[in-house]
């Protein structure tokens, strides 16, 4: 990679190890995340890609017995997201997340999107209205729900729910957006809509996406990381990884000989 | 295939015979299960029949309007009055006091156990809490009379020895485990993915509990509150022991008063002649009590349907 096309760093994992109790789930991961780019994490089930993703917003802190080693540096301020004196809530204020299964709260569409703003203490109706509309537009769902913002969110279709969850994450202007297999519970049409959205969103926000669908990684991402058994096997530009992978294991996975 | 081979036939018929036997067994078991279910339904029907038929005699002597509007309840006096509202007021006031204790306390305990306590603490605390629900209510009654009332009198010197307040407070403590246990079950049934969604937005544990878990579990919480109301309305011994038994139309919890249930105990233990009007009052009172609980059960069913978990 030449210097002139190296984009700005948004985050960087440095010697990241992770343990579920005694079990070591991530082994010495070093990897950059570039600003305003989409980075895809691929690999067979159980390879640690979701574990890695969930380290960024400290989701593992919610369960006892989990332990991090190493650092995830977050730029421009060069904060170590994993440092014990960094409040996980502060981290989650800056990093949004969209889950595998759409998980709208049992509230109205409006309140779902306003949730993160209310968490941050915003109660001004005008500001909320404005940001909710902006977020719903950003998630390409505004036209479908603008006339029924007070309806319960769990009544939406699966694809709409997932875009609502994206709007919910967008409403607070995160710097990094984590997607954990966001289309695995959706049909092909809803999947297409989400992929298009990811493509659109990278103008505004850095995206890290876990996917088990290699075509999806190829379609939406600028960079791809292949993980296997808790290790980062290969990281590079998506077209390079898919056209000429350097590692035999990556090639086997991509060509479907393994995984 | 050798299905037509004669040597196979006995095997097939053996199987059929076995199936036929199984069918008979199934029928016997089904009949037993039906009988068990029928007993409970018939008991309910029997209770309602007795209450209604005896109440009909009662209402031949006393008009329903008097029954509902009279402000005195003196069925055993020469100048007899039959105003059920006197007893209803005692029931309502004591139940409200109990609910004011039990609903906040039970909900807070449930939130703590479900959202904050670690697994070990929960496994120890929950059975102990449920043990509280197994204490005979007569024991609670004496606890109210001999511990809580004197304690309250330190702060409210004018409080009489029997009061709805004292009985209601202890009744509330008795109901706490029901609310806490059922509400905790409802909140634990809320999927982890909803909590994670909230935490990922930067919410704290408390914010998540109050804004995501409680609304998601609302139908379960409502069901526990309704059960608590039914328990409070139907509770007898605590009130008979600690609230005094004189009929008293009051909305003031610091006064003594009889409730529907404590009146029934009082009269049922007395030696009223069978078939007398005084004797029939307990059936009219019992019918009122059943109608009140039925109303809350229907409300509970409706709440459960209205706020069915949709996560």
Image (cartoon, coloured by chain):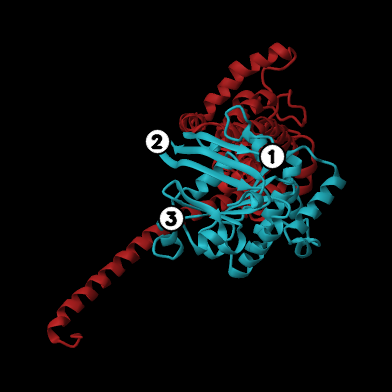
Chain colours: A cyan, B red
Residue for badge 1: A93
Of pointers 1 and 2, the one earlier in the residue sequence: 2
Which residue corresponds to the image point at 65% horizontal and 35% vertical from the top-left? Answer: A78
Q: Nearer the viewer, mark 1 or mark 3?
A: 3
Give neighbour class at mark 2: few <14, some 14-19, many 20+ (Cα, 10 Å): few
| The disc label shown at residue A247, or none | 3
Q: Are the numbered discs 3 and 2 placed on the same chain, yes or no?
A: yes
Is the Cβ of the residue at disc 1 closer than 8 Å to that at disc 2? no
Indicate the chain on which mark 2 is placed: A
Indicate the chain on which mark 1 is placed: A
Of all residues shown, which one is farthest toward the right?
A126
- Which is nearer the eye, B174 or A258? A258
- Which is nearer the eye, B201 or A52? A52
Residue for badge 2: A22
Which residue corresponds to the image point at 14% horizontal and 86% vertical from the top-left? Answer: B6
Q: Position of residue B79 (x, y in %)?
A: 76, 34
Whether residue B241 is visible, yes or no, is yes
**Left or right position of A84 against A196:** left
**Left or right position of A173 against B270:** right
Which quadrant of the rendered structure holds the N terminus of chain B? bottom left
Give neighbour class at mark 3: few <14, some 14-19, many 20+ (Cα, 10 Å): few
Of all residues shown, which one is farthest toward the bottom?
B4
SS at mark 2 in the image: loop
Q: Are the numbered discs 1 and 2 placed on the same chain, yes or no?
A: yes
Asked if B308 appears above or below B97 in the picture, the reply is below
Of pointers 3 and 2, the one earlier in the residue sequence: 2
- Disc 3 from disc 2: Cα separation: 29 Å
Q: Position of residue A148 (x, y in %)?
A: 78, 60
Q: Nearer the viewer, mark 3 or mark 2?
A: 3
| The disc label shown at residue B18, or none | none
């Amino acid at each position: 990679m030449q210097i002139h096309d190296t984009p700005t760093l948004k985050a960087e994992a440095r010697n990241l190890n992770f343990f579920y109790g005694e079990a070591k789930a991530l082994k010495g991961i070093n990897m950059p995340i570039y600003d305003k780019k989409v980075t895809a994490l691929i690999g067979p089930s159980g390879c640690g890609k979701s574990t890695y993703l969930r380290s960024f917003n400290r989701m593992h802190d919610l369960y006892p017995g989990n332990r991090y080693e190493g650092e995830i540096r977050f730029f421009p301020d060069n904060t170590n997201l994993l440092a014990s004196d960094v409040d996980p809530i502060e981290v989650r204020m800056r990093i949004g997340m969209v889950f595998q299964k759409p998980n709208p709260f049992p509230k109205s569409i409006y309140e779902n999107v306003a949730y993160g703003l209310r968490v941050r203490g915003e109660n001004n109706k005008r500001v909320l209205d404005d940001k909710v509309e902006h977020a719903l537009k950003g998630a390409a769902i505004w036209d479908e729900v603008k006339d029924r913002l007070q309806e319960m969110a769990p009544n939406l279709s699966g694809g709409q729910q997932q875009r609502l969850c994206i709007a919910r994450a967008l409403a607070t202007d995160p710097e990094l957006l984590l997607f954990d297999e966001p289309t695995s519970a959706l049909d092909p049409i809803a999947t297409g809509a989400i992929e298009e959205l990811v493509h659109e969103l990278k103008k505004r926000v850095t995206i890290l996406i876990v996917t088990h669908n290699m075509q999806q990684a190829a379609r939406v991402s600028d960079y791809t990381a292949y993980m296997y058994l808790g290790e980062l096997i290969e990281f590079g530009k998506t077209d390079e990884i898919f056209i000429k992978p350097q590692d035999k294991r990556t090639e086997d996975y991509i060509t479907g000989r393994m995984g | 295939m050798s299905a037509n081979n004669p040597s196979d036939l006995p095997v097939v018929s053996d199987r059929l015979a076995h199936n036929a036997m199984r069918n008979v067994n199934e029928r016997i078991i089904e009949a037993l299960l039906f009988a068990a279910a029928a007993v409970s339904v018939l008991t309910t029907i029997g209770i309602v029949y007795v209450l209604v038929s005896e109440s009909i005699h009662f209402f031949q002597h006393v008009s329903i309007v008097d029954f509902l509007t009279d402000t005195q309840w003196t069925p055993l006096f020469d100048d007899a009055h039959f105003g059920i509202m006197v007893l209803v007021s005692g029931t309502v006031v004591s139940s409200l006091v109990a609910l004011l204790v039990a609903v906040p306390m039970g909900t807070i305990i449930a939130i703590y156990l479900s959202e904050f306590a670690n697994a070990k603490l929960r496994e120890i605390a929950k059975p102990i809490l449920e043990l509280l629900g197994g204490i005979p209510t007569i024991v609670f009654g004496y606890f109210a009379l001999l511990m809580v009332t004197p304690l309250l009198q330190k702060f409210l010197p004018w409080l009489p020895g029997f009061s709805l307040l004292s009985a209601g407070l202890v009744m509330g403590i008795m109901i706490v485990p029901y609310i806490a246990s059922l509400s905790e079950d409802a909140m634990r049934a809320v999927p982890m993915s909803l909590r994670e969604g909230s935490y990922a937005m930067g919410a704290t544990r408390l914010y998540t509990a109050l804004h995501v878990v409680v609304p998601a579990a609302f139908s379960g919480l409502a069901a526990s509150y309704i059960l608590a109301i039914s328990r409070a309305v139907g509770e007898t011994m605590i009130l008979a022991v600690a609230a005094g038994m004189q009929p008293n139309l009051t909305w003031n919890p610091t006064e003594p008063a009889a409730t529907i249930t404590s009146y029934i105990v009082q009269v049922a233990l007395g030696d009223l002649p069978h078939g007398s009007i005084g004797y029939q009052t307990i059936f009219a009172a019992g019918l009122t009590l059943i109608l009140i609980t039925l109303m809350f059960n229907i409300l509970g069913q409706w709440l459960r349907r209205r706020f069915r978990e949709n996560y």
